Amino acid sequence: MDIVTIPTHMIDEDTDQPRYQFDEESLQELMKSIEELGLLSPIKVRTTKDGRYKIIYGNRRYKACKTLGKPTIPCIVSNVTDELEIYLEQIAENLTREGFSPIEEAEAFNKLLTDPKFSSSTKYLSSKLGKPEAYIKNKCDLLKFSNAVKKLVVSGTEIKKDKLTEEQLMPIKELPIEHRNPLALLIAKDELSVSDVKRIAKLFKDKDISDSTKNKLLYKTGRELIETWSVFEQNRAERAKAVEPKAPASIKIEKSEKPAKNEEIQTISERVSPLENALQKLSSVLPVYNPFSLEILHAITVMGPNDKDSFILEINQLVDHLEKHLAEWKNVRELAASNESFLLKENL
């Protein structure tokens, strides 16, 4: 691998290369290092038709040398002309460097997958770059977010105020865009942990909560959303425990007819239809209707904002379940009354 010295003015940057964000502070540090020690690693270039050279990788080192006024730069000259191979080499090189942001990486993968010039597949990229297909797909999923969100995405896993990590965004990536972007900005502002983001995502994915209620939840802070999730889950667990069906009592009834051998006693649960069993279970847990007093209704007006929101969530879920039960049992009643497609108990 020969290293040649090329005049700086004969070298051009590749404006289509994957990396385009350069931290000014790290660039200043590189310039200081070059001044003291010289350029330790050559940049890689290719020749162009007009006799000039275009950078394959090493844009940051080129910028530093040019800013310092270096007349020449040590280079490795590549003979590769295939655009796909060049772009893959640029990505592979940047993956080993600090400062290659997750969004730059995502955009590079997406370009290879969607640009007709490349028309690559996820499987092909995985084999060429040594990255799992899931890794490539997760990176591309970052592009689902708005530009305002993407500007906050940084490398690493450390949670910082007004910054976002990939792990923070993954739990909400499949949410509707009207919820996904506002939540991402909220997560950055309130420095929410990944576990808290997963709880909030679970709340917004719950099909029992209406979209209008979810829209109102977006006005809460991150901590308030976690509190709402906690109360909602606790109340749902208690409600599920309360409506857990009890086994019907087994009442023994003697047959009036002459009993067969070993069949003198038969239980009711063996003689009723599945619909009757379902009716008995539902009736056993439904309280007798009793209108709420004015004192109870007045309690709603003194609820705090957080308690009221959680209370409304529970009511919406309860009403939805009751309406489903009501519609189904009305249908059963009509079928029974018309004697159509309804099986009566046998041999009673």
Image (cartoon, rainbow, N blue to C red):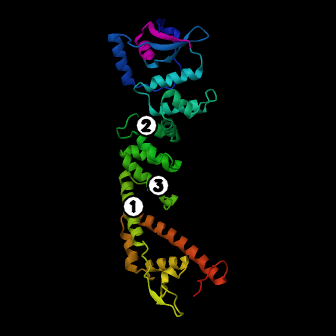
What segment is highlighted magenta in the picture? 61-79
Amino acid, disc 1: Glu
Amino acid, disc 3: Phe
What numbered label is drawn on residue 204?
A: 3
Residue located farthest toward the front when viewing the structure as drawn? 261
Camera-nearest label, 3 or 1 = 1
Residue 121's image quarter?
top right
Q: Is residue 171 visible?
A: yes
Left or right: 220 with respect to 334? left
Residue bearing mark 2: 153
> What secondary structure is marked by label 3?
helix
Quick one: label 2, few (<14), some, or many (20+) residues within 10 Å?
many
Q: Is residue 99 above or below residue 5?
A: below
- Residue drawn at (46%, 57%) of the image: 216
Q: Position of residue 73 (x, y in %)?
A: 45, 9
Q: Is residue 278 above or below residue 240?
A: below
Q: Position of residue 169 (x, y in %)?
A: 44, 43
- Residue drawn at (44%, 17%) of the image: 63
Q: Nearer the viewer, residue 336 or 315?
A: 336
- Residue drawn at (38%, 75%) of the image: 298
Amino acid, disc 2: Val
First in residue order: circle 3 vs circle 1: 3
Q: Nearer the viewer, residue 64 or 219?
A: 64
Q: Position of residue 333 (x, y in %)?
A: 60, 80
First in residue order: circle 2 vs circle 1: 2
> What secondary structure is marked by label 2?
loop
Q: CA distance from mark 2 to mark 1?
A: 30 Å
Q: CA distance from mark 3 to mark 2?
A: 22 Å
- Residue drawn at (37%, 16%) of the image: 31
What numbered label is drawn on residue 233?
A: 1
Q: Is residue 271 above or below residue 33?
A: below
